[in-house]
Amino acid sequence: MNPPGFRTFALIAVGFSLKFLSGRLELAGDLSAAASTRLGYHLSALAVLIAAFGCFAWAFKRIFFDKPAAPPADAAPPEKKPEPVDVYPETFDPDAALARYMSRRGDTDPGDAPVPKPGGFGRKARLRER
């Protein structure tokens, strides 16, 4: 089963439109006062109804009996295998890393931080303060 595409939905829409037109032509033939024009309306309604059936049959064939589209061609294989790249340096110096961190950190002294009030933190500490 193929998933219906735009053409299939278009065929179904045209089929329903032709079916509606066929019904209107038949109604016009039934309401016609002259007997000589009724046959023309009914024959044209029959022709339009056969065309609507053809649209439905074509859409049914596209959904259930058409071969699915060929899968896209795979990409060409690479000419040579890519070489692995080492993203990490050969050696790691933890002292240099710590020195770099401390230099970027700034000149903040831990003694400058505000001293917390005694009694804890959170909701219970706030309730004790009251």
Image (cartoon, grey):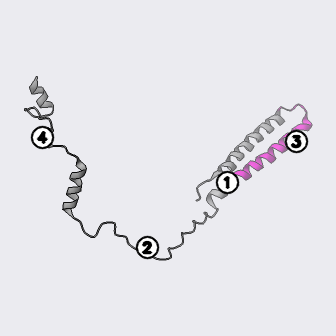
Is 114 situated left or right of 73 in this image?
left
Tell me residue 44's x, y (percent): 83, 44
Magenta span includes 72: no
Task: Give the class, few, some or many, for how many residues have Cα within 10 Å of label 4's Cα (few <14, many ≥20).
Answer: few
The N terminus lies in quadrant: bottom right
Is 45 situated left or right of 128 in this image?
right
Q: Given the image, on which type of amino acid does mark 1 rest?
A: Ala
Q: Nearer the viewer, residue 2 or 69?
A: 69
Q: Given the image, on which type of amino acid does mark 4 rest?
A: Gly
Q: Nearer the viewer, mark 3 or mark 2?
A: 2
Q: Nearer the viewer, mark 3 or mark 1?
A: 1
Q: CA distance from mark 4 to mark 3?
A: 104 Å
Q: Which mark is residue 59?
A: 1
Q: Which residue is mark 4?
A: 111
Q: Which residues are magenta?
A: 31-58
Which type of secondary structure does the marked residue at label 2 adopt? Answer: loop
Q: Which residue is mark 2?
A: 82
Task: Give the class, few, some or many, for how many residues have Cα within 10 Å of label 3's Cα (few <14, many ≥20).
Answer: some
Q: Earlier in the sequence, mark 1 or mark 4?
A: 1
Q: Which residue is mark 3?
A: 40
- The residue at 10%/34% (across/down) is 120
Q: Given the image, on which type of amino acid does mark 2 rest?
A: Pro
Is 51 situated left or right of 128 in this image?
right
Image quarter of residue 73: bottom right
Q: CA distance from mark 4 to mark 2?
A: 54 Å
